[in-house]
Image: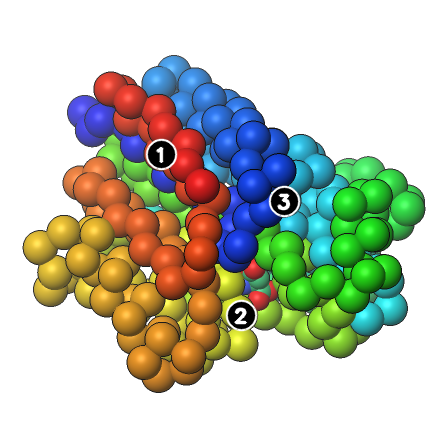
Amino acid sequence: MNKPVLVVHGGAWVVPSEEFDAHKKGLQDALEIGMAILKNNGSALDAVEKAIASMENSGVFDAGIGAVLNDQGDVELDAQIMKSNLEAGAVAAIRNYKNPISIARKVMETTPHSLLVGDGAGEFAKKSGFSKIDMQRMISKKEFDRFSQKKDEGFGTVGAVALDLFGNMCAGTSTGGTRGKLHGRVGDSPLIGAGGYCDFETGGASATGHGESFMKILACKTACDYLKIEKTAQLAAENTIALLERRTSGKGGIILLRKDGDIGIAFNTKNMARGFATNEKTEAMI
Ligand code: ASP
């Protein structure tokens, strides 16, 4: 039997100090929900989906409710989920659904495809029984104010990576993308290997930050490959962010979990909302 481990993040950026508590609570809730599943013999897949859904519902992060607005003042969401047997599902530029992580899971489990986008993703969600919600209910007051003031801050993509008692792993990522992005823009988050990756030969990863940079170095696949040559997951995560900076000047962060439960977290932004839970300890940090 393995020991369960869950690692989560809520974005890498300059988190304003008045938002520290809300971010920490959002992370802690996600850790508690995910860890309860893992401790009760639940799957890494369920733990990652439910941990991410709780952050999508919190209104605190750039995911689900409260996600950033695009240049038309709309919310378009991206998400992916991947199991360590390489099964994966993703949605991109989906509107009017608050839990894209669950729709990504449905894509993985019920279609022969890996990624559905835009209206097609929305039609699939509707047919699969997800409830559509009004765009106004997706937009938080905080985000509306930031968007109106053309603020350049506030990325809070969410992600999770888990190892369950049976040695299975899963990684997921969910985001509203970058504020003011062009309608139809898709970042790294729903792209397998870029914004997330999971493989039982190495481990799992979820990224956050400037998507156009992360996709160029396939950050999460790269981080998992570094696990083969580095002594610790921490070194593998740090090498990935060093590569990101050297080759793209991009900013962001990554969480990485090796197949044996070793954790690595690295970022080159001022803050990264991040946390982990093991049998011994649960900790959320900014
Ligand atoms: N990586 C996300 C994107 O570019 C944004 C973020 O993580 O802050 O869409």
- Tell me if mark 3 has few (under 14), some (14-19) or many (20+) residues whose alpha carbon lies within 10 angstroms of its own: many
Name the quarter where the N terminus is drawn: top left
Residue positioned 32% across, 66% down in the render: 241
Residue at position x 45%, y 49% in the image? 272
Residue 198, visible in the rendered structure: no
Q: Nearer the viewer, residue 244 or 57?
A: 244
Asked if residue 221 is positioned above or below residue 37 in the image, the reply reads below
Q: Is residue 87 left or right of residue 164?
A: right
Residues at marks 2 and 3, CA–CA distance in whole angstroms: 16 Å
Label 1 crowd (10 A; few <14 / some 14-19 / many >=20): many
Which amino acid does the dot numbered 2 rest on? Gly
Pointer 1 residue Cβ closer than 8 Å to ligand 1:
no
Vertical relation: 155 (above or below) 105:
below
Residue located at (61% from left, 39% from top): 19
What's the distance in space between the residues labelled 2 and 1, CA to CA? 23 Å
- Kindly identify which numbered label has been placed on residue 61: 3
The residue labelled by disc 2 is 211
Label whose residue precedes the other's in the sequence (2 or 1): 2
Q: Amino acid at mark 3?
A: Phe
Q: Residue furthest top?
A: 40
Q: Could you give the CA–CA distance between mark 1 and mark 3, rounded to whole angstroms?
A: 17 Å
Q: Secondary structure at mark 1?
A: strand
Estimate the x, y position of residue 284 in percent, counting from the top left: 42, 32
Q: How far across and how far down the image is residue 48, in percent?
A: 47, 38
Q: Is mark 2 within 8 Å of ligand 1?
A: yes
Residue 241 left/right relative to 90: left
Q: Amino acid at mark 1?
A: Phe
User: What SS does tag 2 mark?
Assistant: helix
Q: Which mark is residue 276?
A: 1
- Does label 1 or label 3 sit earlier along the sequence? 3
Q: Residue at x 44, y 60 (%)?
A: 269
